[in-house]
Image (tube, rainbow, N blue to C red):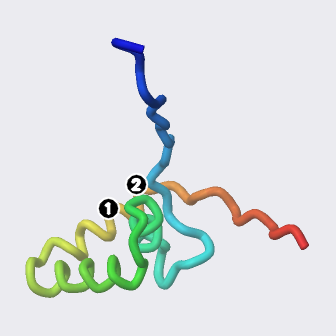
Amino acid sequence: NCGTAMFTPVTVNKKLTRSIQDKKIAGVCSGFAEYLELDPTLVRLVWLMAAFFVGWGFIAYLIAWIVMPYGPPPQPKAA
């Protein structure tokens, strides 16, 4: 087994999209939360603090709102 791979790396092809289900304004923060595998509330708080204290959060949100496409529609759950 010398020189052979011990495991096969699994690559997940994730796309940064706006959320359709969990959105407050445009779904940007929940889309970032899904992509980064974080809590959407935490992302919203960080974005809000960036908007108030740093000043670039509002402009970045508008740009992300325009640029990010909508994600796939939610799949119906099997009973």
Q: CA distance from mark 2 to mark 1?
A: 6 Å
| Residue 36 placement (x, y as % from top left) | 38, 61
| Res 75 quadrant in image | bottom right
Residue at the image position 58 percent from the left and 58 percent from the top: 71
SS state under label 1: helix
Residue at the image position 49 percent from the left and 37 percent from the top: 10
What is the number of callouts on the image?
A: 2
Q: Nearer the viewer, residue 37 or 47?
A: 37
Q: Which residue is mark 2?
A: 67
Residue furthest out toward the front: 1
Q: Nearer the viewer, residue 2 or 73?
A: 2
Q: Horizontally, is 9 left or right of 71 in the view?
A: left
Q: Residues within 10 Å of mark 1 (few under 14, many from 20)?
A: few
Tell me: residue 35, above or below residue 54: above
| Res 57 quadrant in image | bottom left
Quadrant that contains the C terminus: bottom right
Q: Which residue is mark 1?
A: 63
Asked if the residue at tag 1 contacts the one at tag 2, i.e. Cβ–Cβ closer than 8 Å, the answer is yes
Q: Horizontally, is 6 left or right of 76 in the view?
A: left
| Residue 35 placement (x, y as % from top left) | 43, 59
